[in-house]
Amino acid sequence: MNEPAAPQLLRGRLLELTVVALVVISDQLTKLIVVSRLDLHESAAVIPGLLDFTYVRNTGAAFGLLNAADFPGKPVVIAAIALVALFGVGLYAVQLPTSHRTTRAGLALVLGGAAGNLIDRMRQGFVVDFVDAYWNGWHFWAFNVADAAITVGVAIIVLDLLRPSESPLPEAPDEGRAA
């Protein structure tokens, strides 16, 4: 007798679902802590001269793109694009064979991060960012746990793609041997 589709789909993917859930929970929890302890644009030094927690709102897309743009329905449009992207990545992840463990791990981080930020966008129309890294005159975009998970997940996927194939190379014919 065949297993129902849902349990069959979940079998072998429990670790990935756990990673997604842990990223979403840690992302939402850290954002809740920041919002409850800091006023908008307020900073708290973590490592002076290098890292602060600064509560900012990202109304744009990744890395603050479109933050300055203002158009009717902007939060809905950006959330819809994020939802479509999340669905696409999720669909790809579900279809990826279980033997592709490294890529699946990277995708779990990407999915968790995308879901964490999508929750913010749908609930309040912006994403809470707070990790503020800087050095002398250089200042990185503020980010959050979800953004870090997405970045690490993409890096894992790219490194996995660049890794030499594990399949053996076809043997070259021996030129010195007569056929």
Image (tube, helix red, strand yellow):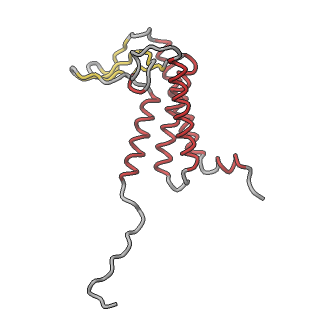
Which residue: 21% across, 21% down? 136
Q: Position of residue 82 (x, y in %)?
A: 52, 29
Above or below — where is 30 with respect to 8? Answer: above
Rendered-image quadrant of the N terminus: bottom right
Q: Position of residue 21 (x, y in %)?
A: 57, 34
Question: Image quarter for residue 84?
Answer: top right
Q: Position of residue 89 (x, y in %)?
A: 52, 40
Numbered circles on residues, count: 0
Q: Position of residue 17 (x, y in %)?
A: 58, 41
Above or below — where is 47 with respect to 158? Answer: above
Rendered-image quadrant of the C terminus: bottom left
Residue 59 vs residue 128, the one in the foreground: 59
Question: Image quarter for residue 44?
Answer: top left
Which residue: 31% across, 21% down? 47
Q: Residue furthest bottom?
A: 178
Residue 102 vs residue 67, the one in the foreground: 67
Above or below — where is 108 with respect to 51? Answer: below
Which residue: 46% across, 50% down? 102
Q: Residue furthest right?
A: 1
Is residue 171 toward the left or the right of residue 6 in the image?
Answer: left
Q: Residue furthest front?
A: 72
